[in-house]
Amino acid sequence: MALFGPRRQAPRLAPELDDVPLGRVLRGIAAARGPGPQDLAIAQMERLLRETGDDWDRRCHRVGVLAHAAPALARGWRERRPRDPDALALAAWSELATDPRGTLALCRVAADARPADPTPWVGALAALRLLGRPSSELSPVWQEIRARDPWHREAYLQILGYLSPEEQGSQTALRDFLDDAVAVMPWDAPTVCLPLTAAVRQYHRERSGGGVQALGVSRYWSQPHTARLLDQATAYWPQPGHLRHAAAVADLGTLAYALIRAGRGGDAGPVFSAASGLVTPWPWSYEGDPVECWTTYAGRV
């Protein structure tokens, strides 16, 4: 099947995913050199976040991407507008990787500036995770997020990482968390990716662990529970309009990866097509260069 004909864009890393307005702002940021263009880029970021309104799922996606792409602009915007909720939220997220303690302080201010917004609380959750703080400190933050957005994708992914054996949890803790979430999760929630994301992470864990687990990893995706995950996702996710959250394309990429590793290339073809060549680093970077891996595997199906 020809996925990448003359009218289809070649595979590329796309932090904005299929968010076209966000992509335009990113291109403006990349071209901003000097005070005038930087002022314009800040104005573009401000307009984009204003237009996002109370779509909390998309707001968090946009804030996270912009914070990574333009930390200096985020700081400049906050200096100009120190009480602006959007400027505060973006500044808090821009400090996350380098100063999680500073992020915590800024998140408190941002949360006060717009009490209904879960985004600052999700930033605080991520900062506490980076700091390796005990669950007693994460729990009240988690409750604040759930009160504002019960199925916040990024918040659940942060907890998934926190409860992993590599961080503060264990396989049992992960399983209990997933079982509780899946039991009551709406079929179209932005968190629909959780079980498959956890399965891919476990697959990587077993491949990297050596010993008996590594020897048996070739059978990982044929086990009943993992095969069922792939069957269910393959049946619904690629259908137009089924996944509507901001990171739907990232979830399709994860599904395509899992199907390839499971030896189900025939099922992977429509998933690659639905993702339109928009590549995310994870999980493809586990195999090598993400775009090269995507291109290679998509070309085989």
Image (cartoon, rainbow, N blue to C red):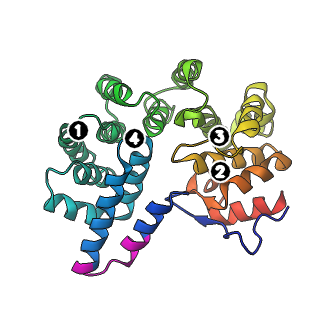
Q: Earlier in the sequence, mark 2 or mark 4?
A: 4
Quarter residue 184 falls in: top right
Residue 252 lies left or right of residue 158; in this view the side is right
Q: CA distance from mark 2 to mark 1?
A: 32 Å
Circle 3: residue type: His
Q: Earlier in the sequence, mark 2 or mark 1?
A: 1
Mark 2 neighbour density, 10 Å: few (under 14) some (14–19) many (20 or more) = many
Residues under numbered marks 3 and 4 in contact, where contact means CB atoms less than 8 Å apart: no
- In the rendered view, tell whether residue 35 sits above or below residue 300: below
- In the rendered view, tell whether residue 218 sits above or below residue 185: below
- Residue identified by numbered label 1: 111
- Residue identified by numbered label 3: 242
| Front residue of 49 and 290 | 49
The C terminus, quarter of image:
bottom right
- In the rendered view, tell whether residue 227 sits above or below residue 255: above
Q: Nearer the viewer, mark 2 or mark 4?
A: 4
Q: CA distance from mark 2 to mark 3?
A: 15 Å
Q: CA distance from mark 3 to mark 4?
A: 19 Å
Where does the magenta region start and end?
27-36
Circle 2: residue type: Gly
Q: Earlier in the sequence, mark 3 or mark 4?
A: 4
- In the rendered view, tell whether residue 247 sits above or below residue 16: above
- Residue identified by numbered label 4: 56
Mark 4 neighbour density, 10 Å: few (under 14) some (14–19) many (20 or more) = some
Residue 284 percent coordinates (x, y): 64, 55
Residue 17 lies left or right of residue 142; in this view the side is right
Q: Nearer the viewer, mark 4 or mark 1?
A: 4
- Residue identified by numbered label 2: 253
The N terminus, quarter of image:
bottom right
Q: CA distance from mark 2 to mark 4?
A: 22 Å
